[in-house]
Image (cartoon, grey):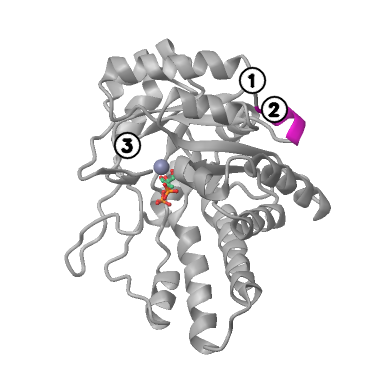
Amino acid sequence: MKRKIYYQDLGLVNTSDMFRQAMQDGYAVPAYNFNNMEQLQGIITGCVASLSPVILQVSGSARKYAHPALLPHLAAGAVAMAEDLGHPIPIALHLDHGNSFELCRACIESGFSSVMIDGSHLPFEENMALTRQVVDFAHDFDVTVEGELGVLAGIEDEVVAEKSHFTQPEEVEEFVGHTGVDSLAISIGTSHGAYKFKLQPGEDPPPLRFDILEDIEKRVPGFPIVLHGASAVMPAYVAMINQYGGRMDDAVGISEDQLRRATQSAVCKINIDSDGRLAMTAAIRKVLSETPGEFDPRNYLGPAREALADMVKYKNEKVLGSANRV
Ligand code: G3H
Ligand code: 13P
Ligand code: ZN
């Protein structure tokens, strides 16, 4: 039998205190996706520089990519790195879009402090039963659990939804009460990936459905809400990618003003993957285009890591309000 590893021994924390503080002080904790060491280093550098708590999140496919046995050690390394940079910050390791009880259990038994069980594609009763099963197991280890109601358009870890289905507020109270989840991801118009909306020339992205969010807040007051698919698809990085040989026509995301407004609500966690991918890709393309003879990975992954750290610091300070909270 494989040796089990629990997050308390890695210096990680679960999301309970993070969300309590974010709810009380009106900001959102950033949840940045990572797959490799440079992404992890960039995220930690940006969060330490801005004195922000952070949720490091890993999808099922990212876990396979990085290797499940390596991940707890990477996370423990992130804790040590933050301390070494002079500012320990609260760090959670979270499974993003877990799609089965077995995957959640494997993560809980290998150092994750928080898991998402995404039963959003299932009928309501089945979603509740699966989520409850994960909560019952996770809470025995003091691991926090995120559930989801409503479906986002775009790719959710190998599952592609053509159309979004907004969360139905009338389902939320029963779901939260019955499952015992610690936070809930909802669908109010965000979507995954770098192509969130198909717009006509000159057309603005549709606003988020804050009316649905407000209805949910009334039904479960003080309960932590999560926004997925919340990258801004920062135009400067898209332009840089296109300038240096890439092709990302029509990439568009959620406006920063909409995200700032969300941080003032019960939204306590905001998920960002695409913006990190864009920042790194832009930096790598620039180096390789300007110095075609370059072949030392440090000389393109290094700038990519720096670009990610800058993006993370900017996001924490100017959009999420999570800076200077540690
Ligand atoms: O919501 C999904 C995340 O962006 C992770 O995507 O499955 O490609 O790692 P991934
Ligand atoms: P983005 O694609 O908008 O970055 O969303 C990421 C996400 O929701 C991860 O779960
Ligand atoms: Zn997501």
Element on which disc 1 rests: loop
Quarter occupied by residue 255 = bottom left
Residue 326 lies in magenta, yes or no? no
Kind of residue indicated by mark 2: Arg
Front disc: 3 or 1: 1
Element on which disc 2 rests: loop
Provide residue 65's location: percent of width, then percent of height. 51, 50
* Distance from mark 2 CB to nearest ligand 1 atom below 8 Å: no
Tell me if 202 is positioned left or right of 138 in this view: left
Kind of residue indicated by mark 1: Asp
Tell me if 10 is positioned left or right of 305 in this view: right
Element on which disc 3 rests: loop
Residues at marks 3 and 1, CA–CA distance in whole angstroms: 27 Å
Kind of residue indicated by mark 3: Ser
Provide residue 175's location: percent of width, then percent of height. 37, 17
**Residue that mark 2 sits on:** 3
Image marks 2 and 3: residues in contact by CB distance under 8 Å? no
Front disc: 2 or 3: 2
Q: Earlier in the sequence, mark 2 or mark 1?
A: 2
